[in-house]
Image: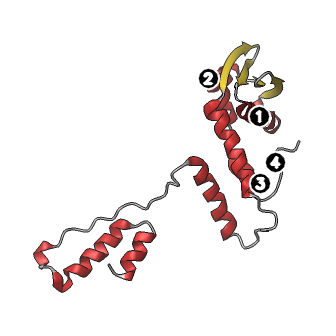
Amino acid sequence: MTKTGLLLVMLGLPGLALAEDQAGHMMGHTAPHAMAPATVAPAITEGGQAAFAAIQEIVSRLMADPDTDWNRVNIEALRLHLIDMDNVTLHARVAAEEVDGGAKFLVTSDAPAVSASIRAMVFAHAAALDGVEEWHMQAEEIPGGASLTVTGDPARIRALGFIGIMTVGMHHQAHHLALATGQNPHAH
């Protein structure tokens, strides 16, 4: 394989590398009638794991920005936040109760690490999203986690459920960048 072919493989374009390699072999090494049409594989874009990909996206942005203050960058803070997100999204139990004008979500776990993640995420989201979509949010600590009461548009709130409400707005991407650059978006 030529240096160009190797470079293309390393850049995630195996289809182009294969086509280049085949073309090199076909020049004088293979009969012209044996040429197979070259196919171009799509670029590989997935990071393989969502948290890894989110960190990769932020690191790429920081590295591309000549104004990045590397003395403030804290990728570990972002990693820990993503662990909290994973714990709440995948490992918490959620019970919903209808309340006048919305719902109260009881978010709990028997695992101390998951309970800590629940409290961190619920309180931060209640503070950040109170008023968004004209909803009122109130968080309270409960045994094993936290409760989140959301009132406003009851049908929408109940349909979205706890995790749907946690995703409202495109605040997470800016939040992740703030964490990675040494800011504390959880401070109220």
Describe the element under mark 2 as helix, strand or loop: helix
Q: Is residue 96 visible in this depiction of the protein?
A: yes
Q: Position of residue 73 (x, y in %)?
A: 77, 62
Q: Is residue 92 left or right of residue 181?
A: left
Specify the quadrant that holds the N terminus: bottom left
Q: Residues within 10 Å of mark 1 (few under 14, many from 20)?
A: some
Q: What residue is rendered at 65% in x and 25% in y?
A: 161
Q: Relative to 71, is 175 above or below? A: above
Q: Amino acid at mark 1?
A: Ala
Task: Find the distance from the CA under tag 1 to the CA under tag 2.
Answer: 26 Å
> Where residue 148 appears, x then y in whole percent?
77, 25
User: Residue 153: where, in percent of width, then height?
Assistant: 71, 23
Circle nearer the viewer, 4 or 2: 4
Tell me the CA gap for discs 1 and 3: 21 Å
Asked if residue 82 is positioned above or below residue 125 in the image, the reply reads below
Q: Secondary structure at mark 1?
A: helix
- The tag earlier along the polypeptide, 3 or 4, is 3
Residue corresponding to mark 4 = 185
For disc 1, the marked residue is: 116
Tag 3 and tag 4, C-beta contact below 8 Å: yes
Q: CA–CA distance between discs 1 and 4?
A: 17 Å
| Outermost bottom residue | 28
Whichever of labels 2 and 3 marks the residue nearer the N terminus, that label is 2
Q: Report the front residue among 180 and 43.
A: 180
Q: Secondary structure at mark 4?
A: loop
Gap in angstroms between the C-alphas marked 3 and 4: 7 Å
